[in-house]
Amino acid sequence: MVLRLLNGLRTLRRPNHHNFLCQLMNSHREFLGILLAPISTPPFDFRHFSDAAQLLPKESSSPERASTPNDAKNNNNATRVSSKSSLNETELAKFSAIAETWWDAEGPFKPLHALNPARVAFIRSTLCEHFRKDPNSPRPFVGLRFADVGCGGGILSESLARMGATVTGVDAVEKNINIARLHAEMDHVTSTIEYCCTTAEKLVEEQRQFDAVIALEVIEHVADPAEFCKSLAALTVPNGATVISTVNRTMRAYAMAIVAAEYILNWLPKGTHEWSRFLTAEELVLILHRASITVHEMAGFVYNPFTGKWVLSEDISVNLIAFGTKNLR
Ligand SMILES: C[S@@+](CC[C@H](N)C(=O)[O-])C[C@H]1O[C@@H](n2cnc3c(N)ncnc32)[C@H](O)[C@@H]1O
């Protein structure tokens, strides 16, 4: 397997190879750097996961940074949140460029539309159990305040509002928020959603808190995943819920979520994902732990080519969704 990959990589390095392979190699230098490292001088710089050294839970942390007056004021002393921005301008520009297509179910966001029923099923099941609500009710989340962080065009926010939640959707890209608002206004149920062009850390500064904070397919696009999780925790009431979905940093995810989805099937625009920005499931659990969120449940998604649908699965090797709760103290 490894030999086959290395042979493949040798082919990739030949001059005049096919454009597709050339593009793929250029956009995935980090991944190829890891593969080649043991056998040669790495031909590429590899950007290590920035929080790798800080992942293990610590009793008293080393001085990561001096606290600032902007640190979370409303965090029940559980987590300290820095004023550091979660914004990664390169990542945001990708979403801004295709913002008009959010509600085109056959467009660049087709995978999110396709995944939505399965992720909503996970949220309904875990949050109904946690908040002791009836999972068979059409509107089980009445009375609960949910934040959808990195809501994009509102695909999930609208589903949550239809299930009765009081939803605040936030996204750093103004075009996304405008599209989300326009779309939500088309139905009186979704027109209740509060959309704001802002970030999780700014909501923390405003001392906002929610029963559940959800960030689907966002953490792989933020500047600092650990700080982002601390902001999510600060936005969650004690014993409230947090749900995060992302792509696992595995070889299989590289093959499926990048090579297949972006370069072969054209499900996503090329360059949507950078493999080195992904977290492994263990890293996600650890940074959530350090942010005072305990993960209780995790699931993956698998595609059924016969039905054309995604379903929840125990296989978390490519996509994963995690449910956790904020520790009481
Ligand atoms: C892949 S989309 C996911 C959209 C939505 N959560 C969903 O799954 O349907 C990622 C979204 O996160 C937003 N985003 C990225 N970094 C962000 C940040 N630091 N704060 C707020 N939103 C952010 C992007 O603008 C984009 O809309």
Image (spheres, grey):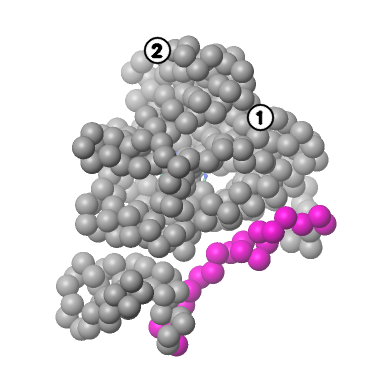
Asked if residue 181 lies left or right of residue 204, the reply is left
Task: Say what amino acid the circle numbered 2 marks.
Answer: His
Q: Residue at x 41, y 51 (%)?
A: 318
The span picked out in magenta is 41-60
**Residue 56 is a magenta residue:** yes
Q: Residue at x 28, y 35 (%)?
A: 309
Above or below, 235 against 274 in this view is above
Q: What secondary structure is found at the residue carrying circle 2? A: loop
Mark 2 and mark 1 in contact (Cβ < 8 Å)? no
Q: What secondary structure is found at the residue carrying circle 1? A: strand
Q: Front-most of 301 and 232?
A: 301
Q: Which label belongs to residue 58? A: none
Prevailing secondary structure of the magenta residues: loop
Quarter placement of the C terminus? top right
Question: What residue does disc 2 label?
Answer: 188
Is residue 168 visible to us here? no
- Which of the 4 image quarters holds residue 314? top left
Looking at the picture, how far across and down is residue 227, in whole percent?
64, 51
Task: Say what amino acid the circle numbered 1 marks.
Answer: Gly
Looking at the picture, how far across and down is residue 11, in whole percent?
23, 79
Quarter placement of the N terminus? bottom left
Question: What residue does disc 1 label?
Answer: 240
Q: Residue at x 50, y 25 (%)?
A: 125
* Mark 1 Cα shell of 10 Å, populated few (<14), some (14-19), many (≥20): many
Ligand 1 shows up in the quarter that is top left
Looking at the picture, how far across and down is residue 173, in whole percent?
44, 43
Is residue 276 visible to us here? yes
Q: Residue at x 46, y 36 (%)?
A: 151
Of marks 1 and 2, the one in the foreground:
1
- Of all residues, the one furthest to the right in this rendering is 60
**Residue 75 is a magenta residue:** no
Is the CB of mark 1 within 8 Å of ligand 1? no
